[in-house]
């Protein structure tokens, strides 16, 4: 296997190659570090490259295999596989900027709970990937950092806020990636970069050792090349930690098993518009309709219908802008849109009223799923924007454009439902087209099985981005 093929080999296959002693953890880490050094100056996908610690960890794991070989079955599931961590999640001894250069010297004193689980699964951490400031935006262009670019076309954004994670993975600068999603921040970048991204159900992934600042809206989740990789990383991430305010039982069987299971006929709804914000553009409509046709051919019952999400818009904005205030970062060092959101932040009473309204509207939306198993929607309402396309707009104009673009994503953050973004082809600009599948609460297994079924019949990406070769 040549070096490019190895760089783009799915993480589960890399883990198997390591178990079979066909490649070592150190070889994989050196491969990715070389690619990061060569390609990332143009891509801007990493804020911090943890080269020294990654080499040390990979060397120790390689020596463990060669010095006193262990049975493959006794190794953690991703032993020696390189991964990236989004720079909203602390890694002990490494700066955690949250996309703000004022925090470049702030060194994390602990591992985030999700990082602990990733280490326990045997992964080697390559570094911290770029994020929009405070995770607020669906593009990744924080002040003081190079903009993150889409490896399929460097003129375009890879999305946000997990833009660095998706760009690095799509360019072959990691084997798999951790992201987080408070309003589409996993699904959007996965869609822009032709990857699989899972936004888990509320309570599936713990926020340990800290808490949840957004009343259950945000969650960590996987970004991967394949449905199986994403499912296996979700297995790693999932599980209760003492003190969690809400949680779900462990999946039985595993999510990885669900990716291999056949699924019966489902009742599937779809839509290409989000009231009251309008229709998706032609490319995003094409992605949905192409997927719907495949679902019908696969034996599922498909009908055009969608819940009314309009009542979520105002309270969701109130909760989201409150997260800027909760960061504690002074207004003078924030980007203009975040300063605008901070200035709009109301009282604690207004915040709680918004949370109450979100919960009430969510009950109405979830009632829709009493008679539907899955809802197919666009991920965003239009194709990726160019890097810097909105840079000269006022904060108010930018915010309104953001609301319209990401409209299909925030409803599941409000309701706590699972959703998965999957690639379905390419548009005329060579950028990926994707859709999202939204499931009943706690029904990740159904979505994973359905996504795997679609993955098996969708056109496969047989080459990496030209930029990455």
Image (cartoon, rainbow, N blue to C red):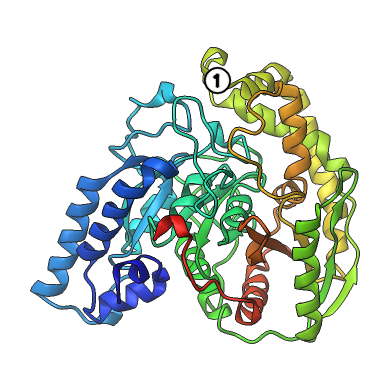
Q: Check the image and report above or below for 466 versus 452.
A: above
The crowding category of the residue bearing disc 1, from other C-alpha atoms within 10 Å (few below 14, some 14 to 19, many at least 20), is many
Q: Kindly tell me whether residue 262 is visible in this rendering.
A: yes
> Which residue position is annotated with label 1?
334
Residue 74 falls in image quadrant: bottom left
| Residue 347 versus residue 446 in the image, above or below | above
Locate residue 122, reporting x and y percent.
31, 63
Q: Residue at 88% across / 41% down in the picture?
A: 311
For the residue pair 203 and 11, the one nearer the viewer reads as 11
SS category of the residue bearing label 1: loop
In this rendering, is residue 28 above or below 105?
below
Q: Quadrant of the C terminus?
A: bottom left
Q: Which residue is pictured at 87% across the width and 62% down the height?
A: 368
Which percent across, then down, holds residue 287?
74, 64
Q: Quadrant of the N terminus?
A: bottom left
Q: Is residue 337 left or right of residue 464?
A: right
| Residue 171 shows in the view | no
Q: For this view, does 278 lie left or right of residue 3?
A: right
**Residue 377 point in image, percent of width and height:** 78, 60
Which residue does the image show at 58% across and 26% down from the upper left? 326
The image shows residue 309, relative to residue 93, as above or below, that is: below
Q: Could you tell me residue 408's position as x and y percent?
A: 76, 51
């Amino acid at each position: 296997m040549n070096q490019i093929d190895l760089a783009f080999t799915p993480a589960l296959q890399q883990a198997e190659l390591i178990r079979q002693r066909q490649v070592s953890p150190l070889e994989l880490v050196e491969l990715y570090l070389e690619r990061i050094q060569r390609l990332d100056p143009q891509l801007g996908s990493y804020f911090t490259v943890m080269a020294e610690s990654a080499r040390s960890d990979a060397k120790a794991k390689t020596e463990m295999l060669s010095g006193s070989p262990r049975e493959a079955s006794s190794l953690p599931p991703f032993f020696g596989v390189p991964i990236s961590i989004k720079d909203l999640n602390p890694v002990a001894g490494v700066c955690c900027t949250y996309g703000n250069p004022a925090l470049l010297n702030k060194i994390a004193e602990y591992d985030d709970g999700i990082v602990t689980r990733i280490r326990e699964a045997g992964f080697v951490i390559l570094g911290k990937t770029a994020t929009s400031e405070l995770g607020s935006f669906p593009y990744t262009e924080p002040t003081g950092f190079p903009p993150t670019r889409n490896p399929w076309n460097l003129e375009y954004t890879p999305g946000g806020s997990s833009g660095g994670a998706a760009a690095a993975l799509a360019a072959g600068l990691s084997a798999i990636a951790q992201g987080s999603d408070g309003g589409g921040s996993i699904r959007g970048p996965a869609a822009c970069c032709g990857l699989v991204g899972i936004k888990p159900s509320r309570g599936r992934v713990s926020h340990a050792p800290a808490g949840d600042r957004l009343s259950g809206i945000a969650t960590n989740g996987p970004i991967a090349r394949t449905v199986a990789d994403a499912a296996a990383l979700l297995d790693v991430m999932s599980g209760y930690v003492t003190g969690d305010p809400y949680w779900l039982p462990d999946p039985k069987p595993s999510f990885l098993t669900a990716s291999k299971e056949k699924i019966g006929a489902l009742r599937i709804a779809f839509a290409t518009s989000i009231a009251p914000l309008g229709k998706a553009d032609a490319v995003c409509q094409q992605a949905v309709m192409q997927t719907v046709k495949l679902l019908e051919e696969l034996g599922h019952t498909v009908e055009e219908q969608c819940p009314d999400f309009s009542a979520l818009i105002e309270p969701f904005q109130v909760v989201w802008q409150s997260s800027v205030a909760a960061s504690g970062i002074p207004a003078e060092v924030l980007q203009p849109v975040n300063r605008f959101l901070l200035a709009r932040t109301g009282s604690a009473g207004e915040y709680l009223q918004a949370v109450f309204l979100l919960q009430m509207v969510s009950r109405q939306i979830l009632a829709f799923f009493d008679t539907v198993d899955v809802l197919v929607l666009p991920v965003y309402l239009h194709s990726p924007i160019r890097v810097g396309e909105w840079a000269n707009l006022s904060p108010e104009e930018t915010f309104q454009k953001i609301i319209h673009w990401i409209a299909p994503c925030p409803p599941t953050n409000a309701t706590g439902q699972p959703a998965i973004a999957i690639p379905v082809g390419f548009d005329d600009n060579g950028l990926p087209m994707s859709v999202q599948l939204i499931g009943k609460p706690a029904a990740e297994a159904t979505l994973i099985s359905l996504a795997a079924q679609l993955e098996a019949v969708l056109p496969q990406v047989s080459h990496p981005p030209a930029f990455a070769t």
